Image: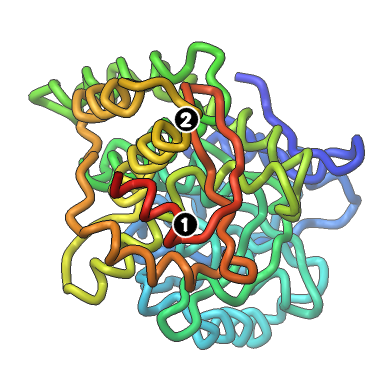
Amino acid sequence: MEDICIYNGGEAISRIVFGQKLSGVTGAFAHCTGSAQTLPVYMIYDRNVEAFASEAEAVLSGEPGLKFCGKYGVEASEENKTMASVLGMNGWLLENGADRNAMILAIGGGITTDMAGFAASIYKRGVRFAYIPTTLLSQVDAAIGGKTGVNYDSYKNMIGVIRQPEFTFICPEVLDTLPVRDFLSGAAELVKSFLIEDGGWYRRSVDFLSRFHEAADKPAFLKTGRAELLELIHAADSVKAGVVSRDQFETGERRKLNLGHTFAHAIEKNAREAGDDITHGEAVSMGMVMAARLSTRAGLAEKGFPEALETDFRNAGLPVDCPYPVQALVDAMSKDKKAENGTIHFVLLSAPGSVAIYDMTASHAAEMLAI
Ligand code: GLY
């Protein structure tokens, strides 16, 4: 399967490499060991995926041109996604003699890659880094596009930088052991990519997920459907890489990737305060349905489109009903870090592959949704 690159002014600045097996990561390193020097690799991994970290360590330790310099396990939770954790990583790098030639390899989901990417970006004013994402969500979103960072108080991803990993290695094998709920959380972001740019992939993704939803033995379904899943991930990453190449620093088009997210962040905030358990992907799924409803109310989408989307999502096992009243979301939306002078860039959706950014206040959006 062909690599995908993220470009800046015609120059490839990050490569997404695909392989069936974790051991294929050596192929990804082939792109960065061009110098005569041996590349010192420092691994930062989520302790929940210790087995993958050990497997990658074994593979990389025997690889000519690389020097495996040790690994550092982290607890990957939103509570632990802090500056203190990043400084812990920096301290470990320093104690273990990492110099400016070091390459940090992060293995884990989005929390781990966000933190390790940020730690690498500030260590000695920035060293190289690469990712092996181990969740569907990080394979199609978090580990692609260079957003790194940590939470601050109750504000998610408030401190960070945009800096691209040298490569992201995508391997569906690591998804075999992912809990179903986490898989579906990533599936919402996968479908989001195809609602932004379709090319026939929206229907293919919903069909795949509907079969997954119906399958009695989901791990077995994922094993037999691995090639199909990899194609979907590849297509979703192509969409994201294209958008990021055109607008790396999110001054315009990249905002489209926030489809469903303004509502989702408000839903997640309400859930935290109420002690409810809602994953990011579940909130994004509900948020995309709300964006479709708002589009209809704003006269952009045809009547019946939100209902059709809801049917697709239900069949795919994705949640559609927000458990909180719209009014409860207004306050949180106004405080969203992406709000500018009270105005929010809402991403509206009129059909799969047809999204547009509309600026309005949260209360105006709420009024329209309440009609
Ligand atoms: N997750 C949205 C973005 O990377 O821009």
Q: Is residue 93 above or below residue 180?
A: below
Q: Could you tell which of marks 2 and 1 lies nearer the N-terminus?
A: 1
User: Disc 1 marks which residue?
Assistant: 110
Pick the front one: 266 or 158: 266
Q: Residues within 10 Å of mark 1 (few under 14, many from 20)?
A: many
Q: From the top left corner, tell me how far across and down residue 183 is, in percent.
A: 30, 41
Image colouring: rainbow
Q: From the top left corner, tell me how far across and down residue 18 is, in percent.
A: 57, 30
- CA gap between label 2 and label 1 equals 36 Å
Q: From the top left corner, tell me how far across and down residue 369 is, in percent.
A: 34, 46
Residue drawn at 66 percent across, 34 percent down: 27
Q: Quadrant of the C terminus?
A: top left
Asked if the beta carbon under badge 1 is closer than 8 A to the nearest atom of ligand 1, the reply is no
- Dividing the picture into quadrants, the one containing residue 278 is bottom left
Residue type at numbered disc 2: Gly
Which numbered circle lies on residue 163? none
Q: Residues within 10 Å of mark 2 (few under 14, many from 20)?
A: few
User: Disc 2 marks which residue?
Assistant: 299
Q: Quadrant of the N terminus?
A: top right
Considering the numbered disc 1 on the image, is that residue within a helix, a strand or a loop?
helix
Pick the front one: 323 or 122: 323
Residue drawn at 56 percent across, 58 percent down: 344
> Quick one: which residue is furthest to the left in this view?
216
Residue drawn at 71 percent across, 53 percent down: 250
Residue type at numbered disc 1: Gly
Residue drawn at 91 percent across, 40 percent down: 9
Looking at the rendered image, the disc whose residue lies closer to the viewer, 2 or 1, is 2
